[in-house]
Image (tube, helix red, strand yellow):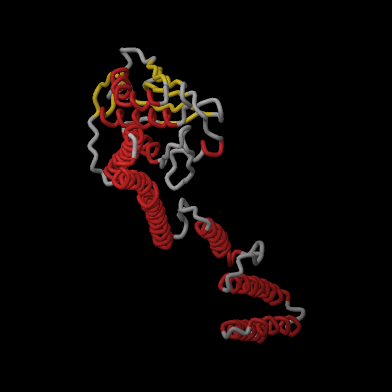
Amino acid sequence: MDPIKEKLISIINKTLVTLLEGKREQAKQVLDQAGTDLDGEEECQEIILNLRKFIGHYLEGTNFITALAEGNLDFEAPSHNYVISDYKQLQSNLRHLTWQTQQIAKGDYNQKVVFMGEFSVAFNKLIEDLREKKLMQDELKDLYATREKFISIISHDLKSPFNGILGFADILQQDYNDLRDDERKKYIGYIRDSATMAFKLLENLLDWSRIQTGRIQFTPEQLSLSRLVLENFLLLRPVADKKKIHLYSEIPTDAIAYADRNAVLTILRNLLNNAIKFTSPGGKIVVTSRIISTDTEVIVSDSGVGITKENLSKLFKLGENFKTEGTEKEKGTGLGLLLCKEFVEKNGGTIRAESEPGKGSRFIFSLPLHPNT
C-alpha cells in the first residue's frame, strides 16, 4: 500500500478512536498534527480538512446537547450544523413546553401539548387532572362559603327574632297584671313581628337548602304575571299598610311568562318584601313589565333609600356580607336576593338591580315568554 495512504488511514483511525474514547480535544490535536505531517499532499489535506470540519461540527453538537441535558435552554444553537438539526427542534419544543408549564403554574389549564409523541398524551392527562382538581377546589370553596353563610344566618339572624319573642314574652308573663291593655297589645305586636320575621327567614332557608340539594322540582307552565303580582299584593298588604306604602301594578292583564309558578311567587314575594323594608312611610312601590325579544322582564321599583354603588356590586353574591337596616330598623340577611337569583336562573332568566342612594331601587328579572325560548 502506498505509504502516504497508509499513513492517512492510520491518522483517520487514530482520530476516530480518540473521538470514540471521548477525548474530543485530543482528536482535534491529532488532525492538526496530521496536517503538518502530510504537508504537500493535496488529496490528503482535503480529506483531513473535511474530517476537521466534521469534528468541529461534532464538538459544537456535543456542547449543545450537553447544555440541553443540563437544562440550559438558552444555549445558542450553532448554525449550519446538520448533525444537531433534530436537537434544535427539541430545544424549541422544550422552550415552548417550559412556557406552557409556567402558564399552568399560574392557573391556566387550557394548555395542550401536541408535539412530543407519547409524552404529550401523559402531559395532557396531567393537565386534565389539574383542571379537574381546580374545579373541585372551586366547588369546595363555594360549598364552604354556603356553609359559612348558613352558620352566620342561624347563629345571628335567626337568633335575633327568637330573642325578641322570648324577651317580650317574659315581660308579658312577669308584668302582665301591671301592664295596661295598650301596653300588652304593643308587646304582643312585637312578638308577632319577630315571629313573622323568623318565619320568613326559615321559609327562605328551607327553599335555599332544597334548591342546593336539588330537591325542588320546577314545573314550568304559562303564567299570568298580573295575577301573581296581585296574589303577592294581597299577602303583603298588611305589612305595606302598616308603613302607609302604596302598592301599584301596571302589568297588563295579558302579560305572560313560561316558568314555575311557585318559583315566580317566591321571587316576587322577596323583591316586594325588600322594597317595603327600604321604602319610607308614605312611599310607593310599582311593578311593571315589558317584552324584550323572547323574554318578559318584570320590574319592581320603589321610592326607597336606594343602594350605594359599592353595595350594588355585592348583591346576589354568596359570601358578600353587607347589611342595611330598613327605614324602620327592619333586619335582613340578604338570603332572599340569593334565592331570587337561584330561582330566576333555574327558570332560564336573569336578574339585576339599578339604584342610587336617595332615589330608590329597581330590581329587574326576566323569564322566557314561551317553552321554545
With respect to residue 281, does 11 lie above or below? below
Q: Position of residue 22 (x, y in %)?
A: 59, 83
Does residue 265 appear anywhere in the picture? Answer: yes
Q: Residue 87 falls in which quadrant of the image?
A: bottom right
With respect to residue 215, does 18 lie above or below? below
Q: Position of residue 6 (x, y in %)?
A: 63, 85
Q: Residue 48 falls in which quadrant of the image?
A: bottom right
Q: Position of residue 295 (x, y in %)?
A: 37, 22
Point 46% across, 60% down: residue: 116
- Quarter of the image with the C terminus is top left
Point 37% across, 16% down: residue: 249
From the viewer's perspective, tell me whether residue 51 is left or right of residue 123.
Answer: right
From the viewer's perspective, tell me whether residue 248 is left or right of residue 311.
Answer: left
Does residue 372 appear anywhere in the picture? Answer: no
Pick the residue in front: 258 or 131: 258
Pick the residue in front: 221 or 358: 358
Outermost residue toward the front in this view: 178
